[in-house]
Image (tube, helix red, strand yellow):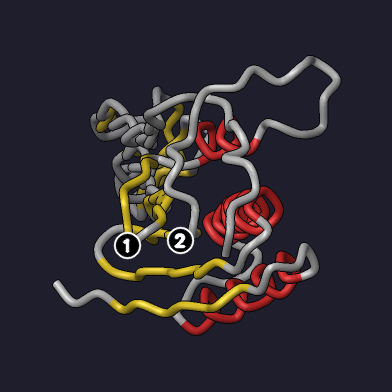
Amino acid sequence: MQVLQVQLEVGADPAEVGRARRWARSRLARSGIEEDEPLAETLVLLISELVTNAVVHTGCPAVLRMLFGGAGVRVEVVDVSDRPPAPRRADGDATNGRGLELVDGLADRWGWQREGAGKSIWCEVDRVEPVRTETVGVESGRAGTEEGEVAGSGRTESAAGPAVTGPAVTGPRDERPAVPAPSAGTAQGTGAGPAWWMSPGRVHC
């Protein structure tokens, strides 16, 4: 399987997070994932959280990678800190400390690994194609009337004489049960790992 990898060097500046989002949107569009697709929105949000944690909490540059191939997209953010992410419970009203809680809820899979003197935090999101459903209509009908029948009148006419009153003669009814349309499938994944993020602290770049 061929995998396309693109990467961006992110400077040690919180303003770089916005640049990383714009870069990610352009690369997603080039790969055929439009900006208004739910997958694109999810990936941009994940990238924003991971880059923010890498740059703001370490105060050092980072590297953002996106890998396209298979059934989804993989995102990797490499920073210079070798400290693994550790559980941290954010207060109810706190606006910080929820990075990996969000990643755990949005990504199908995520984790981290050592890379050089630092580490790489990665996540994967599957691309789920929409499920098409087909409805099979009910075939029911009424055979044609006997020759010369006047529809709805119960009378028949013949060329030999006047109309004769009598019950209308109809063909047999053809009733077939409806075939239910297949139900749309659902796709659901669960993340792995701790649900909170602990800042690794500032490190020497």
Report the residue at 67% width, 54% height from top. Answer: 52
Q: Which residue is mark 1?
A: 116
Residue 84 placement: quadrant:
top left
Report the residue at 59% width, 31% height from top. Answer: 198
Left or right: 101, with 168 as reference point: right
Residue 167 placement: quadrant:
top left
Left or right: 184, with 46 as reference point: left
Along the line of sight, which residue is nearer the eye, 2 or 169? 2
Count of picture labels: 2
Q: Measured from the top left, where is residue 123 in percent x and y?
A: 41, 49
Q: Measured from the top left, where is residue 6 in percent x and y?
A: 42, 79
On-image quarter of the C terminus: bottom right
| Looking at the image, residue 190 lies above or below residue 143 | above
Q: Which residue is mark 2?
A: 78
Residue type pointed to by label 1:
Gly
Graded by Cα atoms within 10 Å as few (under 14), some (14 to 19) or many (20 or more), the crowding at tag 2 reads: many
Q: Is residue 178 visible?
A: yes
The outermost residue toward the front is 204
